[in-house]
């Protein structure tokens, strides 16, 4: 290597080292803000058990403010496992529901597709529509299951269904 190249390399190396060594420490200023701890996870909402009086089989007496003309086959059963099954007058139905205290939510219902008389089909429509709109389920002292919409209007009333005693009728 020639002397001039060696001198040039030495100058570059010295300049690089001088640049690294001359960095001033950070200026004194306010301390960085402390990092706030992550917010605590929200407390789990306590599970509200369903009103046990609502569970079980019921005979539908009234749907959407009118009594049923033929109550013999209009039934519903709120099962403890979260399923609802029944007969809407002509066709069978089944689905899922949640009930926390008196707050009711019924999921989409599957129904059979039998054709019946026009009167039974109209009655069935009232039953299924009442179930779709139900937001509360109560059993007041009179003993009737009462389903209400979100505004508190009564959608359905049903009496306790005892299969053994009903078979004799």
Image: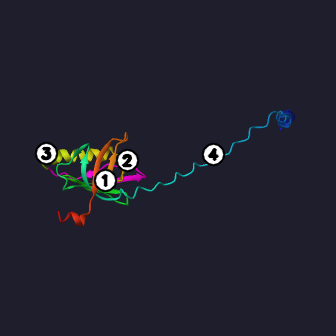
Question: Which one is nearer the viewer's eye here, 7 or 108?
Answer: 108
Residue 140, above or below 24 = below
Determine whether, in the image, residue 43 is placed left or right of residue 78.
right
How far apart, in angstroms, are the residues tagged by discs 3 and 1?
Answer: 28 Å
Quadrant assignment, res 153: top left
Residue 101 position, x and y percent, is: 43, 52
Quadrant assignment, res 1: top right
Tell us which disc is closer to us: 4 or 2: 2
Q: Which mark is residue 118?
A: 3
Residue 92, above or below 36 = below
Q: Earlier in the sequence, mark 4 or mark 1?
A: 4
Residue 145 position, x and y percent, is: 32, 52
Q: How is the image coloured?
A: rainbow
Range of the magenta residues?
Answer: 94-115
Residue beneath label 1, please? 144
How far apart, in angstroms, are the residues tagged by discs 3 and 4?
Answer: 60 Å
């Amino acid at each position: 290597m020639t002397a001039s190249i060696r001198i040039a390399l030495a100058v570059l190396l010295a300049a690089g080292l001088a640049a690294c060594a001359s960095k001033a420490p950070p200026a004194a200023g306010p301390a960085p803000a402390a990092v706030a701890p992550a917010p605590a996870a929200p407390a789990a909402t306590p599970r509200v058990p369903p009103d046990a009086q609502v569970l079980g089989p019921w005979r539908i007496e009234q749907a959407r403010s009118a009594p049923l003309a033929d109550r013999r086959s209009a039934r519903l059963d709120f099962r403890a496992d979260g399923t609802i099954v029944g007969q809407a007058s002509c066709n069978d139905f089944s689905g899922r529901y949640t009930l926390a205290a008196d707050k009711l939510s019924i999921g989409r219902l599957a129904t059979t597709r039998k054709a019946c008389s026009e009167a039974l089909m109209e009655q069935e429509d009232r039953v299924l529509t009442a179930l779709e709109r139900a937001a509360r389920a109560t059993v007041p002292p009179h003993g009737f299951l009462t389903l209400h919409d979100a505004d508190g209007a009564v959608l359905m009333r049903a009496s306790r269904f005892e299969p053994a005693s009903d078979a004799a009728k």
